[in-house]
Image: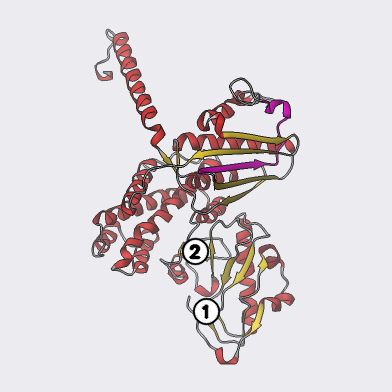
Amino acid sequence: MISIMSVDNFNQIIEDVNRENTALLNTLSMYEDKIKASHEVNIKEILTTRVMPFVEASHVRCEIRLIIGADIPPVIGSYMDYSRALINLVSNAIDAIEEAGRNGLIQIMLTRKEGKVVLIIQDNGVGISSERLQLDNKNLPLFVGRTTKPEKAGEGIGTRQIFSTFGAGNIKVQSREGKFTRWIISLNISTKKKTDQLSLLETRFIEFMKSTETIDVDRGSTRTEVASLIWQLREMEIFSYDLIQPFSRYNNVRDIYKLALSYRYGDTSFRQLKDEIEKCRVDHEIIRYWLLGMLNRIKQNESYFLKSFDFQKYKGSYFKSYGQAIKKTIIFTLDPDTGHFYAADRRLAEHLDFVPYLGRQREQLIRGEFKGDVKNLDSPILMGVWSVTNKEDLYDKIALLQRGGQQLLDMGIKPEKRLSFYHVTRNLSSFDMDTLKVITLGRMVKLSRDAYDELITATDEDFDGLVFTD
């Protein structure tokens, strides 16, 4: 219609375009209403990929604590609506914390109770007065749709959207003015039958490919927007681990991962990657093409990020985003002077696999691992070195670990985070790191050389010169 538009028919063409546009929107709205109730939503995924990056990137000093119960099933709803509602909820929490003028704490708990998935979000902001918690004739608290912000920003649109998405009957708001606000949201568990693993992989692959066709950030984007896409990029990488795993029945998956690593950061071309992957046997041929497509998209988006944004500014997001792999053990090799690192699922890689891409000798690097959310203070990060020749060299390696620990602090890991240590891989001395020792990250980096002995232990003479695995 636009192509035939002229001065003579301008009004008629515009009217036709508007009519067709309205018809299309109505059709889409009807379709959304029809299928909305049958959508399955993974709340854990929304919390880790949307909500946590949003809080992490906030200008308000705020700690977030996430507690997820075991075996949380998908719920019924709309992914986009749920995402917007939870972002609105934590955005209001951050505003309330800022108004309170205190260090913020947002606690999120996801559990299963009485046939429902229950989501609890609590902040230590200014709270809501008891009068505004009273319900109106629509069973909505009086604060819904009414903002108390001085600039009247949004006029309470966020709270209306939250109640519209989850339903007033599924939300309970508790608060004490000046102390806290707690939202308790009950969600209906999906009753769909479980699909097989192949269908799950296919669904996730399609979702990732559609959602990452374009990169919606540039140098003018906010830190929140950039951090969110970094977490999405990491989610794609973690998904690629699941695509590599089906090859394990007939192949060494570590060889496949090293090939993928060389494609992402080395000299291997996509053609070479494709030729080698096609030689690997797998039960379902389609997985081969999903893996190739995912690795190609990851490299494309990751290259854009690294060229467009300062790594030092976002290295905390890069590192902490691996915490999405809640059920995996993540190993990493870190340059303690720059903070550059590479990481992967322990089942797919060894620490030495990353050394060539960091441009340093392995003795100048440190190795480590963690499991689950790195912000969980009780779950320690393990750190270690490759070789030690004598006690003085061991002291030097502890100093190296201290520099690595400082990099973790610079990434936003809490000083209270616990650390423990690997055995030295190749040890020619009579001393080793004490693998039973647990110390906080903050104490570790401040430890004086005179106090290093509390981190080491004498080795049994029968084990002198022992080489441990990487």
**Residue 214 colored in magenta in the image:** no
Is residue 198 or residue 277 the one in the foreground? 198
**Residue 128 colored in magenta in the image:** yes
Q: Residue 113's x, y, as percent? A: 55, 46
On the image, which quarter does residue 138 sit in?
top right
Amino acid at dot 1: Thr
Residue 98, relative to residue 232: is it above or below? above
Callout 1 crowding tier (Cα within 10 Å): few <14, some 14–19, many ≥20 = some
Q: Which residue is mark 2?
A: 329
Query: Could you say which disc has been placed on residue 367 in the image?
Result: none
Query: Which residue reaches farthest top?
Result: 8
Residue 55 appears in view: yes
Q: State which mark lies toward you, 2 or 1.
A: 2
- Residue at 49 percent of width and 53 percent of height: 71
Q: Residue 33's x, y, as percent? A: 39, 27
Is residue 189 or residue 331 the one in the foreground? 189
Of callouts 2 and 1, the N-terminal one: 2
Exactly how many numbered labels are in the figure? 2
Amino acid at dot 2: Thr
